[in-house]
Image (cartoon, helix red, strand yellow):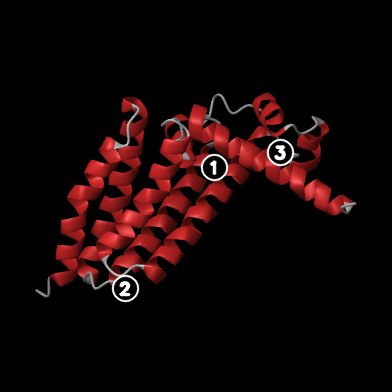
Amino acid sequence: MPKTQDRVGSTRDRMVDSAAVLLREYGTAATTIDAVLAHSSAPRGSVYHHFPGGRRELLAAAVTRAGDSVSTLLHDYADTADSPSALLRRFASLWRSRLVATDHRAGCPLVAVAVDHPADEPELLDLVRSITDRWTAELRAGLLAQGVPDTRASALAALVLASIEGAIVLCRVEGSAAPLDAVVAELQPLLDGAARDTSP
């Protein structure tokens, strides 16, 4: 029989994961405590035990977990990619697989919070900003490792993140991965060309 601590951790994890799923698929307004409890099958008392700050604390935990997960993957992609376009393809494939697996319902939980955060919870937007800054930094580091000049790496990292996030929104609207595929196709030669550019 698992220890009580293990069971407690499991319940909290289920709730955080459920909140992230609901954010991705239905947005901030629909990610209520009741919805999370129903999705995670957690008892109501778990909210007060694990998240004394209520919904605000639960949303912050879900966004943090999603942000940390993608940051780790970006770091791994940078270590294993053999070109800037390979880094791009791997980043895009993460989102594409999630979109396809959910019939194009799952977007990015950070975008959900960014466009629909409660007005009285500005700290959630600050949290999203810190995570997107981290993602951009990971992309920049990956591009630098693949030979993109320092003078262009920051701008191209921001372009990649903005393009991928925008494409995810369009994929959900169109019910198709075509916008994401189009973004990847257009950005690949740009990124690889930047790595070959030796001009000062």
Distance in Å between CA atoms under marks 2 and 3: 41 Å
On screen, residue 134 above or below 17 = below
x, y percent for residue 113: 48, 36
Q: Earlier in the sequence, mark 2 or mark 3?
A: 3
- Amino acid type assigned to the residue bearing label 2 in the image: Ala
Front residue (pair 75, 52): 75
Q: Amino acid at mark 3?
A: Gly
Residue at the farthest left position: 199
State the quadrant of the C terminus: bottom left
| 4 relative to 193, above or below | above
Q: Secondary structure at mark 3?
A: loop
Q: Mark 1 is on which residue type?
A: Glu
Between 121 and 45, the residue placed more toward the observer is 45
Q: Mark 1 and mark 3 in contact? Answer it, CB < 8 Å.
A: no
- Looking at this view, is 114 or 71 the one in front? 71
**Residue located beneath label 3 in the image:** 53
